[in-house]
Structure formats: structure tokens, C-alpha cells
């Protein structure tokens, strides 16, 4: 899944007056860009793991998509605790804690493989996502802090680029390493010790992939720890996130937060099912590895779309642009589900291009007019990322009782609501007083 990195996590507060002047630390900027690349890439690996685990554990689509539920639930559960860690320990120490938590999640793939139990894999992904949540709590405000305020937008755009690069590259490598190891044995015909041995053997490449990531994460965490005192105490520990929930009573903001929930859910649901969708004989009929490599086109489209969208947003109102890409996504789903062959496959992949500017545009429209309460609002919107834990398994449930094509009706419905929001929010919002 590609989550826009410009939002702050719940409880993350603005830095103090000295910090807002910016910190001249080019080396730390490189570190933050690397973080965006890492957590973007690891998140997109879920799209490769899902078909692997589905085959090994003979899961239904709904069951397999619990991978996304376990992963994205961490955003909802750990955002506020992660923000508390940042307040207590500071940015760099909190980053180290997050990286080490991600490492622990990667290492849990070892007992998951040895146990041959799907639930243990879900636990490993949950812990991994908890670490990613903490890292994002650090990275989001830190990229704005590291440099003069006048260039903050360009740094954020550059960080988004690295996030998209990660979501494009990791599925290609993951497909070769993880899906390429699928055996020709039908696991559904095995039982008992033979089945356990088969699952253990077949998950070894998954384990090796995440162990390699664990080694890389430990190295990055060690480098970050050596710089733990670079920024000093620049975290504001005043205020409370709880009062931010009152913003949901504001229709423009409340509906916007719901649209973030729906957008992330729709994007993740489609990305999670791409491999299975492209393997169908009535689409492209790919093998698992080839289909997995094509996931990169979905996320790569989002990367390209960012640059196109950045220009479009300068000359067209954000609400109209949002409505346009939402109706474009619906049209592509309609084309894909009512055709066959290359048209069906590539039209689904092209939805990534439509997704590209949805998150930041919904975020900006929802936050418009919040004034000094914008930081509170961004926290609530970040919690709405939990849509990635809800919409995918529901989509899978529909697929289990019908077809993958028909299941796309749920993401289409999500985009329809986003289209309506774009029309509703096409005019500037009035300012509200800070409280």
C-alpha cells in the first residue's frame, strides 16, 4: 500500500519556535528520505506476500486479506502511543525505537515459518507495522523541520518520491524472491507432518527476505542512534490530541476523514488482489512471478501521477481534480471488469495513476480552514488510514462469494463517495477559530 507521508500521526505536535526556523542538517535529510523509501517499500511487500500465504495455507480471499487488516490496524492502535514516545524520547531516539520494532517484526517471521501457522505471520506483520507507525510519526514532521520553512514543500515532495520509489521497487524484488519459490506441489492435498514440513520449506524465502531487511534495519537504527542528540529538545509536549476529535463535527473535515478511510481501503484492496487478478485466464493469464512484477506498474503509476497532478493542481481547483481522478478510477474499474485479456489487466493497473493525488488532495481539502487546529486534524486523518485494514477483507469476502471482477464493486463505491466529496469541497472552506 502507498500512504502519503505528509500527514502527521495522532498526537504529534508542532515543534517549538526555535525548531520552526529549520535545522541545517543535510545528513539527517538523507536519513529521513531513506526512511520514506524503507517503510513505503516494506508496506508494498504485502501485495506479494498475500498470494504466497493464500496458496500455502489454502485461504479464501477474505482470509488472505487479513494480512492487510493485521498491518493497517497498527496505524489505528499505535499512532497515539508512538506520538507519546516521540514526546518523551525525542525524534532521533524514537526513530531508533521504531526501527528496532520493525526489526523485531522481521525476526518474528522465523518462528512464523517454523510454526507453519498463519496467525503467527499476522502477528509478525502487526509488530512490523507498529514499528513503521512509529517511524512515520518521526519522519512526517521531521522532514519539515530539517531545513528552512520556505523549502518545506519541495522536501515533502522529494520525500514522497522516495516513498513511491520504494513501493515500485520492492514488489519486483519480492516477486522474484518470494513468489519465485512457489513449489508445484498442491498443499491442499497434504496433511499433518507433511503439510507442516511443506509450509516450513516454502516460507524459507519469505524468512530470508525479512531477515535481510532486519539486518539493514539494525544498521540504520545504529546510525540513527549515533545522532540521537543532534536535534536537542525540539518537541512540544503540551496540549492533548483528544480535543481533536471534536473536529469530526465539521462536515468538510469529517467527510474528508471518511474519504481517507475509503481511499486507503480501495487502493490497498486493489493492490492486494492484483496478482490473483492478473493470473486469471480471462485477463492476462500470468504466472505468479510475472503477475507480482506487474504490481510495480500499479504503484509506479502513482509515482508518475504525482508529477502530473502537481501541475494540474496549479491550474484547476483541488476539488475538481479529485472528482476527476475519482471518476477516472471508476471508469477504469468498469472497463477492467467488463472486458477480457490485456485491456482488463492493464486498465486495472492504470488505477494507480488515478490514486496518485487522492491522499494529499483529500487531506488538504479536509484540513482547509482549520487554521491553528490543522495539526490536530492531521492526527485524526492519519488514524483513518485504518481503512486499509477494513476494506480489503470485505472486498475479499465479496470475491469469495462471486468473482474477483464483481468484488471490484466495493472499491468503485469508495471512489464514488470520494467523487462526491470532490464536488462538495470544490469551493474554499471558511476559517474556524482556534480553541
Image (cartoon, helix red, strand yellow):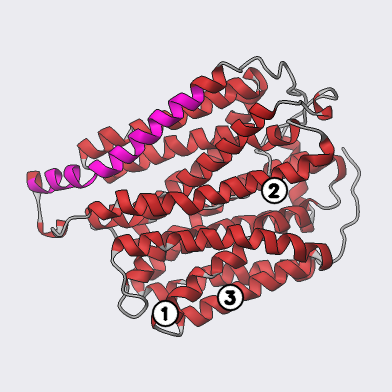
Q: At x 77% / y 47%, what residue is drawn?
A: 247
Q: Is residue 416 left or right of residue 349?
A: right
Q: Which residue is mark 3?
A: 330
**Label located before the other in sequence (2 or 1):** 2
Residue for badge 1: 342
Q: Quadrant of residue 90?
A: top right
Looking at the image, residue 254 sits to the left or right of residue 262; the answer is: right
Q: Quadrant of residue 288?
A: bottom left
1 vs 3, front mark: 1
| Residue 95: % across, % down | 57, 26
Label 2 vs 3, first from the N-terminus: 2
User: What SS does tag 1 mark?
Assistant: helix
Q: Which residue is mark 2?
A: 157
Looking at the image, which residue sits at the far front?
26
Image point (58%, 41%), residue name: 36
Rendered location of residue 198, percent (x, y): 14, 47
Q: Is residue 243 magenta?
A: no
Q: CA distance from mark 2 to mark 3?
A: 27 Å
Q: Residue furthest bottom?
A: 339
Q: Is residue 76 visible?
A: yes
208 magenta-colored: yes
Of label 1 and label 3, which has the lower sequence position? 3
How many residues crowd around disc 1 within 10 Å: few (fewer than 14), some, or many (20 or more)?
A: some
State left or right for residue 200 relative to residue 241: left
Q: Which residues are magenta?
A: 194-221
Viewer-nearest residue: 53 or 202 = 202
Amino acid at each position: 500500500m502507498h500512504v502519503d507521508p505528509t500527514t502527521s500521526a495522532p498526537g504529534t505536535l508542532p515543534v517549538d519556535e526555535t525548531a520552526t526556523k529549520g535545522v541545517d542538517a543535510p545528513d539527517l535529510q538523507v536519513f529521513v528520505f531513506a526512511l520514506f523509501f524503507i517503510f513505503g517499500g516494506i508496506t508494498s511487500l504485502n501485495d506479494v506476500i498475500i498470494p504466497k500465504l493464500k496458496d500455502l495455507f489454502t485461504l479464501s480471499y477474505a482470509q488472505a486479506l487479513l494480512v492487510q487488516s493485521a498491518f493497517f490496524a497498527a496505524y489505528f492502535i499505535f499512532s497515539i502511543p508512538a506520538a507519546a514516545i516521540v514526546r518523551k524520547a525525542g525524534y532521533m531516539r524514537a526513530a531508533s525505537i521504531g526501527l528496532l520494532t520493525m526489526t523485531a517484526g522481521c525476526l518474528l517471521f522465523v518462528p512464523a515459518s517454523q510454526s507453519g501457522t498463519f496467525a503467527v505471520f499476522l502477528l509478525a506483520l502487526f509488530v512490523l507495522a507498529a514499528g513503521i507507525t512509529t517511524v512515520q510519526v518521526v519522519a512526517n514532521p521531521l522532514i519539515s523541520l530539517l531545513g528552512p520553512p520556505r523549502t518545506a514543500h519541495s522536501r515533502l515532495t522529494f520525500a514522497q518520491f522516495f516513498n513511491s520509489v520504494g513501493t515500485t521497487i520492492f514488489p519486483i524484488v519480492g516477486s522474484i524472491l518470494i513468489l519465485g519459490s512457489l513449489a508445484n506441489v498442491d498443499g491442499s492435498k497434504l496433511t499433518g507432518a507433511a503439510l507442516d514440513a511443506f509450509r516450513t520449506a516454502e516460507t524459507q524465502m519469505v524468512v530470508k527476505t525479512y531477515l535481510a531487511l532486519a539486518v539493514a534495519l539494525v544498521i540504520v537504527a545504529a546510525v540513527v542512534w549515533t545522532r540521537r542528540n543532534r536535534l536537542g529538545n525540539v518537541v512540544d509536549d503540551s496540549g492533548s490530541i483528544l480535543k481533536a476529535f471534536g473536529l469530526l463535527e465539521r462536515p468538510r473535515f469529517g467527510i474528508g476523514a471518511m474519504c481517507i478511510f475509503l481511499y486507503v481501503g480501495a487502493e490497498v484492496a486493489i493492490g492486494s488482489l492484483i496478482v490473483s487478478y492478473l493470473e486469471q485466464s480471462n485477463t492476462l493469464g500470468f504466472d505468479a512471478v510475472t503477475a507480482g512484477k506487474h504490481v510495480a506498474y500499479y504503484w509506479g503509476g502513482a509515482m508518475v501521477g504525482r508529477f502530473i497532478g502537481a501541475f494540474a493542481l496549479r491550474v484547476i481547483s483541488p476539488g475538481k481534480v479529485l472528482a476527476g481522478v475519482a471518476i477516472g478510477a471508476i471508469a477504469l474499474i468498469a472497463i477492467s471488469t467488463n472486458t477480457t485479456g490485456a485491456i482488463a489487466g492493464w486498465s486495472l493497473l492504470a488505477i494507480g495513476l488515478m490514486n496518485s493525488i487522492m491522499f494529499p488532495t483529500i487531506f488538504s481539502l479536509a484540513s482547509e480552514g482549520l487554521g491553528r487546529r490543522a495539526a490536530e486534524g492531521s492526527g485524526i486523518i492519519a488514524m483513518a488510514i485504518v481503512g486499509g485494514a477494513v476494506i480489503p477483507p470485505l472486498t475479499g469476502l465479496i470475491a469469495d462469494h462471486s468473482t474477483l471482477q464483481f468484488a471490484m464493486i466495493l472499491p468503485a463505491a469508495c471512489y464514488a463517495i470520494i467523487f462526491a466529496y470532490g464536488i462538495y469541497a470544490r469551493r474554499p472552506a471558511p476559517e474556524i477559530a482556534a480553541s
